[in-house]
């Protein structure tokens, strides 16, 4: 019989702690994101079930649904986490007009490579999933579009951008090549994961400036 005098008010909507959950020290939400990142990048999105994510996180499937509505919510948050820090930096770099645009573009390229390849799960590989074009990922696509435009503005402020000032399609193509290089680095990193990420990031940023038509020496100007 319930409702005795010793019982306090019941809390509604808060999941009970799961004995299955490992003692990693991470909050449950973060644990689920780490589990999803590992599974999505290792075996793909379609092949990963919510039960598998919950079990990898050390909790029951019902508990997982307290934090996320399903796999697509997990994927959306993971993808947004690959763009949000770069977008913050890009806004800062655009406002920092006292320094050469080439140097600022180089810094953005290097930072993005560190972000995409510096974690344990190579999150940049998520961009290759066919499900990334999903409608429910609209916020990620808006963030990514703003980041791409920040690249274009920085590129436009370089010497190469000045030469292309009257050629909008030419500038857009050059920007797409730079942006594509940065987002595609996860394939190179995945093939040689032991390569130091910091060295890889600087080399990629140097290559991006060369593709932009600036020359890597401009970053030290």
Image (spheres, rainbow, N blue to C red):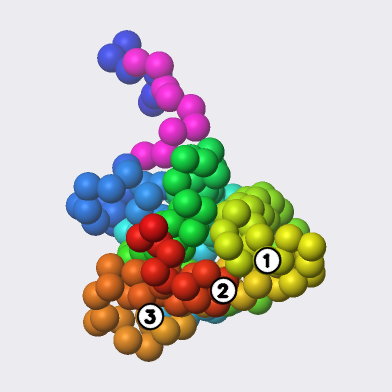
Main secondary structure found in the magenta portion: loop
Q: Position of residue 18 (x, y in %)?
A: 32, 48
Q: Is residue 13 magenta?
A: yes
* Circle 2 residue: 213
Distance of mark 2 from mark 1, alpha carbons? 10 Å
Q: Which residue is mark 3?
A: 189
Residue 104: x %, y % from top left: 46, 53
Choose mark 3 or mark 1, whichever is in front: 1
* Vertical comparison of 187 with 119: above or below: below
Question: Label 1: which residue?
Answer: 163
What is the magenta range? 8-16
Q: Nearer the viewer, residue 143 or 8?
A: 143
Q: Nearer the viewer, residue 54 or 215?
A: 215
**Is the residue 52 above or below the residue 142 in the image?**
below
Q: CA distance from mark 3 to mark 1?
A: 33 Å
Q: Give the CA separation, mark 3 to mark 2.
A: 24 Å
The label number, if any, that marks residue 131 in the structure image: none
Spot the residue most to the top: 5
């Amino acid at each position: 019989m319930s409702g005795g005098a010793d019982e306090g008010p019941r809390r509604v909507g808060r999941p009970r702690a799961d004995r299955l959950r490992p003692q990693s020290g991470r909050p449950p939400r973060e644990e689920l994101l780490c589990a999803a990142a590992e599974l999505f990048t290792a075996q793909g999105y379609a092949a990963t079930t919510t039960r598998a994510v919950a079990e990898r996180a050390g909790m029951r499937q019902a508990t997982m649904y307290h934090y996320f509505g399903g796999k697509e919510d997990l994927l959306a948050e993971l993808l947004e986490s690959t763009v949000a820090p770069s977008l913050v930096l890009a806004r800062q770099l655009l406002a920092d007009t006292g320094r050469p645009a080439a140097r600022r573009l180089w810094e953005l390229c290097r930072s993005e490579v560190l972000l995409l390849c510096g974690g344990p799960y190579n999150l940049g590989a998520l961009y290759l999933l066919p499900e990334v074009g999903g409608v429910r990922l609209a916020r990620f696509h808006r963030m990514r579009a703003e980041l791409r435009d920040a690249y274009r503005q920085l590129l436009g402020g370089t010497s190469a951008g000045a030469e292309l000032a009257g050629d909008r399609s030419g500038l857009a193509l050059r920007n797409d090549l730079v942006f594509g290089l940065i987002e595609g680095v996860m394939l190179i990193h995945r093939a040689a994961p032991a390569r130091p990420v910091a060295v890889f990031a600087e080399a990629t940023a140097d290559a991006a400036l060369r593709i932009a038509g600036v020359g890597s020496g401009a970053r030290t100007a």
